[in-house]
Image (spheres, rainbow, N blue to C red):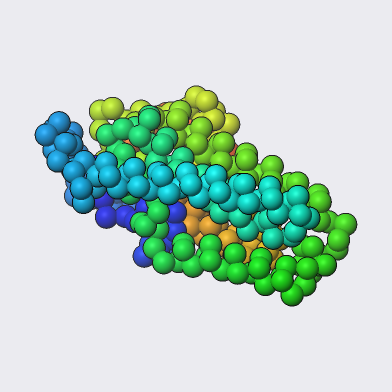
Amino acid sequence: MANNDPPFSWPLHRPVLRTPWSPDFHANGHAHTALSLSAHPPAAPPSPDTILQTTLPKGPRSLAGIALRAGLLGATFSSTLIYTTYLLNKSSHFWRVPFFLAALSLFHFLEFWCTAQYNPLKADIASFLLSTNGWAYTMAHTCAVLECLFWYTFFPNLRIPRLPESWHYPLLGLGLAMVVIGQVIRSAAMVVAGTNFNHTVQFTRVAEHKLVTNGVFAYFRHPSYFGFFWWGLATQMVLGNILSFFMYAVVLWLFFRARIEREEELLVKFFGQEYEDYRARTWIWIPLVTWYPFGRRKVC
C-alpha cells in the first residue's frame, strides 16, 4: 500500500486545494477519490524471501542499520538524561537542552519499536523517522535548541524569556506533563491500531484494514496526531522558547489540518456510515481543526 506521500512528520510538498464546499465540489471530490483508489491498487504481501533480502546491509530493513540507529538513540537518550540530572543538580538553566534531546531520541526510538512490535511487516529503517522528514524538520529542532541557548546564555535571569517570572514554574510543569502525555497517547495509538497504523496516508483499503474505535481511539479521533501536536508544543514550553513555540504551533496546525482533511475523506470512502457515526461521537482535540465536508461541521 505504499504511496508517494512523504512521512507524516513535516508538511513538505503537500499542496492542498481549498475550495468552498458545494454539491459539485462534493461530487468532484468523490470522483477524485475514486480515481486515486483505482490508481493505487493493493500491493501483494511480501514473500519471506523478499523480506529476507531487505534485511541485508543497505536494504530498507537492514538489520545492521536498525541496530546502529537503535544503539545511537539509546546512547543519546541515556547520556542526555544523565546530563540533564547533572545540570539540574548544578542549578543550571541549560538542563532544558539535553532534556529536549532525550525526549526527541525517545520519540524516534518508540516510533520504530511500536511499529516493529505491533505492525512488523511495515517496520523498516524509515520507521525511525530520522532521515525521512526533510530538512525543515531538522532545521526546526536546531532552531529550537539555538533559541534556548541564546536566551539562557545572554539573559539567564529572565527564566522564560519575555514572560513574568511568576509564570515560570506553572508553564514548566505544564510543559513537562504535556511531553509525557503526548508521547504516551501517540505510542498508545500505534499499539492499539496495530497493523492498521501507517506513517503515510493509505489510498486503498485492504481486507485486513479495520476501523479502530477502542482504547485511546474511543476518546481521540486521531490520537497519534493529537499526541505529536501537543508533544511538539510542550517541548518548546520546557525549553522556554517563545519564537519556536509559535513556529511549531503554526506549522504543525497547518500540517495536521491538511492531513486530517484528506484522511477523513478517505476513511468515509473506506467505512461509510460506520466512520460517520464514529467521528460524530469523537473529537480531534487540536484547536480549530474541523473536517465535515459531507454535511454537519463540528469544531474539535
Residue at the (74%, 75%) spot, across then down: 154
Left or right, residue 85 beside residue 35:
right
Q: Position of residue 74 (x, y in %)?
A: 47, 44
Q: Quadrant of the N terminus?
A: top left
Left or right, residue 225 beside residue 1:
right
Residue at the (37%, 57%) spot, across then down: 131
Q: Position of residue 232 (x, y in %)?
A: 58, 53
Left or right, residue 176 beside residue 124:
right
Residue furthest out toward the top: 214
Q: Quadrant of the C terminus?
A: top right
Residue furthest out toward the left: 49
Residue at the (61%, 55%) spot, across then down: 98
Q: Nearer the viewer, residue 299 or 87?
A: 87
Visible residue check, residue 193: yes
Q: Is residue 74 above or below residue 212?
A: below
Q: Position of residue 99 (x, y in %)?
A: 62, 51
Q: Nearer the viewer, residue 75 or 106?
A: 75
